[in-house]
Amino acid sequence: MVNAYQELQKQNTVKSNWEEDQITDELYNFIQITWKEDLSEAANSVIPKHQSPKYPKMKKKGRAPTIDIVFKSRYFERRFLCFECKLVAHSNRSQLVDYIREGMMRYINEKYSNEEPIAAMIGYTFENAVDLIVNAINNKILKLDGLTQSDKIIEKRFDFTDFANSYFSRHSRKTKGPIELIHMFFTFGN
């Protein structure tokens, strides 16, 4: 995923007026390219899937809302890691709320990844101040119903990936046990 983002960033094709779905479509194209080039055992055991109805194989998958990108087992009908993507800026209240309510809360409320103990959020941003975005998300978490101090994005996390803009949060769920969310912020422009 990080390799695909880095290739996408190098190409400088994402524009500041793009919508979330446009960026996700372009990211998915780069995921396919980098995945095919990766000959590792991990890349051969899981395959990326895009949930957009634009892609023919996915047209009959789920009803809105659906997760944006899923890595599935090549051999079993099992998801390994799901990614929900959102536009986010530290000064845009509606994007911050959307990141939490339409992203994080879908995992916490078991609409997404209810069988998996780990999942991921990708925040697309045109700001280079990721720490400001994380602080803004955390401040907004404390103001929304159903979330507490323990739901905050609490630390940078490098054991999953060496990607510098990776963070971590842990959340309780009603029936399936806790879920850990990896938050990756992909910056474009500037």
Image (cartoon, rainbow, N blue to C red):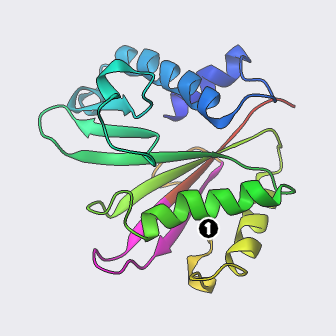
Q: Nearer the viewer, residue 63 or 48?
A: 63
Q: Is residue 11 visible?
A: yes
Apparent side of residue 157 relative to residue 136 in the rendered image (left or right): left
Q: Residue at x 59, y 81 (%)?
A: 147
Apparent side of residue 62 relative to residue 185 in the rendered image (left or right): left
Q: Residue at x 62, y 63 (%)?
A: 100
Q: Residue at x 59, y 64 (%)?
A: 101
Q: Magenta span has 187?
A: no
Q: Quadrant of the C terminus?
A: top right
Give the percent coordinates (x, y) of residue 104: 54, 62
Q: Which residues are magenta?
A: 165-181
Q: Is residue 94 above or below residue 110?
A: above
- Seen as rendered, the residue at the extreme left is 75
Give the percent coordinates (x, y) of residue 51: 40, 35
Give the percent coordinates (x, y) of residue 186: 66, 40
Numbered marks: total: 1
Q: Nearer the viewer, residue 16 or 45?
A: 16
Mark 1, residue position:
155
